[in-house]
Amino acid sequence: MQLPALFNLPKSTLQIYGEQVYSTSTDLLSKCNKVAWYISTKRPTIFGVVPYNPILGETHHVSKGNLNVLLEQVSHHPPVTALHATDEKENIEIICCQYHIAKFYGATVEGHIHGKRRLKLHNHGETYEMNSPDFSIRFLPVPGNNWVGNVNIKCLETGLVAELSFTMQSFLGFRGNRRAVKGKIIDSSSRKILCEINGHWDSTVAVKNTINGEERVILDAREVISGLQTPIVKDSKSVWPTESAIVWGQVNQAIMNKEWEKAVKAKKFVEERQREILRERASKGETWVPKHFSLSHTKEGDWDCFPVQKLVPPSPIVS
């Protein structure tokens, strides 16, 4: 949704998606705790403000330790975002292709998030496919937002499946089920329940072994996001001109300085320039091609993407 700069976070949606992968103080990926890592990617958001809609070809490239993360806006209609993250030391790879469709339901807006997400643990010969819950924004009677819906995380090689359910608070705003997540881990071949999962994704989540009754905390969200710092630029000359912070730099600065008129003009300049480029491309009969991904449209009507490079290179921006 296009909104005035007053209602924008000084960030692009690409940065928000990327932060879900690299912005943690606890390395859950190298611990191979797949369910805990997935739940940790769901973060609380500020009600009433939204990030910018990325322009076509915009990128976000950040390194955190051995983990290198690259995102690119590979389509504008629909707005498809591709993500590739690799950790060469741990031999871990993440590939995501997602797009959202907003639907209005009177007092609420729901962003239905589509696309494929794959987590590959090459050392273990395991590939995990997963979907995303929807994002719900409620205006009445109690304003708020939350992740809602059902998620499946399936290992293609072992047949183990985690079935998660994200629930929102009641209509009147009572906190009983606020940001709750529950679910189970099952063996898909026998349908036997191996573990039960219960908690709140913004605090703690525990898993209980149904065989021996042992229960342990697999995620402490406060620990995961504590002590986080803003990414820094180590080599400004190596930052790509398509980087989100470059594309939206003047808008970001104006918003942080609360210079709203300047922010509106800067945002309009970015958006008008993008429209101008699209018109020029159309007049020449040119088709835009992503630089870092190849994009395909599946028979099921979904979108999928494939990285051009095997490994994401280190970034001049580090977290």
Image: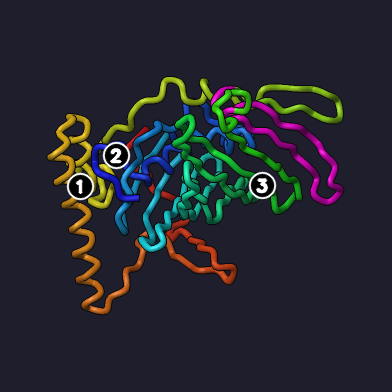
Q: Which residue is drawn at 44% across and 65% down?
A: 294
Q: Quadrant of the C terminus?
A: top left
Residue 298 spot, x, y in % from top left:
55, 68
The residue where tag 3 is placed is 152
Among the two numbered marks 2 and 3 on one chain, the one whose residue lies closer to the N terminus: 2
Q: What element carries label 3?
A: strand
Kindly report the distance in space between the C-alpha atoms of the residues bearing marks 1 and 3. Answer: 38 Å
- In this picture, residue 152 sits left or right of residue 282: right
* Residues under numbered marks 1 and 2 in contact, where contact means CB atoms less than 8 Å apart: yes
The residue labelled by disc 2 is 8
Q: Main secondary structure of the magenta part?
A: strand
* Along the line of sight, the residue nearer the viewer: 266 or 157: 266
For numbered disc 2, what is the local secondary structure? strand
The type of residue carrying mark 2 is: Asn
Q: Residue 66 at x, y = what percent?
A: 45, 37
Q: Nearer the viewer, mark 1 or mark 3?
A: 1
Mark closest to the chain's N terminus, 1 or 2: 2
Left or right of residue 98, residue 9 in this image: left
